[in-house]
Image (cartoon, grey):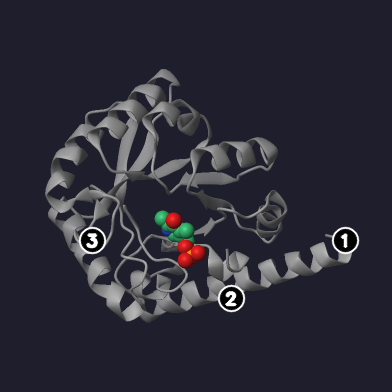
Amino acid sequence: MDESAATMAATSIAERLGEVRERIAQAAAGSGRDPSAVCLIAVSKTKSTEQIRAAYDAGQRDFGENYVQELTSKAAELGGLPGLRWHLIGHVQTNKARRVVEVAHMVHSVDSERVAIELGKRAAAAGRRLPVLIEVNIGEEGSKTGASRVAVRDLLQVVQAQPGLEAAGLMTVPPYELDARQTAPYFERLARLRDELGGPQQLRELSMGMSHDFEVAIAHGATMVRVGTAIFGSR
Ligand SMILES: *Cc1c(COP(=O)(O)O)cnc(C)c1O
């Protein structure tokens, strides 16, 4: 990319980021919530470090990646940017838990006791308390990832028993083919499950909502929305 093309691309990322922030603020206000109670996570998978940098320069600090390998190489390249926080939102392979603990601010996708125990062990060894979310397969049928609703209670206890982990909340990914209206019941169910598990005092974060349905998720109580395409363009 020549310089003017790079500048143009950076401008459009900044503009789209501004639009997404505006939509978040409106969705929050529309349900009587404070916009600052919703954290925007810019999902940068497959996107270059230049594009991430453009979003950072426009004030974005929280970024989400799906793959540990991609996360660690981007984190190494962008290591000097103050305040940048990486969120791992994809499946954790237990053999990569140590790397995850080194770079991730938060892990959204703890879906098994094995993963919880391994992350807990590595985090404790590194002297940190890693905030994690339990990924719930709220639809049971359509979505392929996440712990089943019945397994969540036991998994939560395992997470809470790890001194290296903080059980910070719940996350879900509805089946991707559903439109915004159809995903609403999934968000409702995740919010209800959080209430059954002790409410926001116990589990403060609800990570739900993507480019096509983050406003619906905010209406149902999302505290974190994971938005890729609407900021960086299609993948
Ligand atoms: C890719 C991805 C996102 C972002 O999806 P968009 O539709 O691009 O906003 C959010 N959450 C997870 C778990 C993802 O894998």
Determine the secondary structure under disc 2: helix
Q: CA distance from mark 1 to mark 2?
A: 24 Å
The residue sitting at 24% across, 55% down in the picture is 137
Q: CA distance from mark 1 to mark 3?
A: 45 Å
Q: CA distance from mark 2 to mark 3?
A: 27 Å
Mark closer to the chain start, 1 or 3: 1
Task: Tell me whether the residue at label 1 lies in contact with that at label 2, contact meaning CB atoms closer than 8 angstroms.
Answer: no
Image quadrant where residue 209 sits: bottom left
Q: Where does label 2 land, which residue?
A: 19
* Nearer mark to the viewer, of 1 and 3: 1
Q: Nearer the viewer, residue 192 or 174?
A: 174
Left or right relative to 15: residue 225: left
Left or right relative to 88: residue 223: left
Q: Can residue 195 be seen in the rendering of this structure?
A: yes
* Nearer mark to the viewer, of 1 and 2: 1
Residue 225: % across, % down: 43, 62
Q: Nearer the viewer, residue 189 or 130?
A: 189
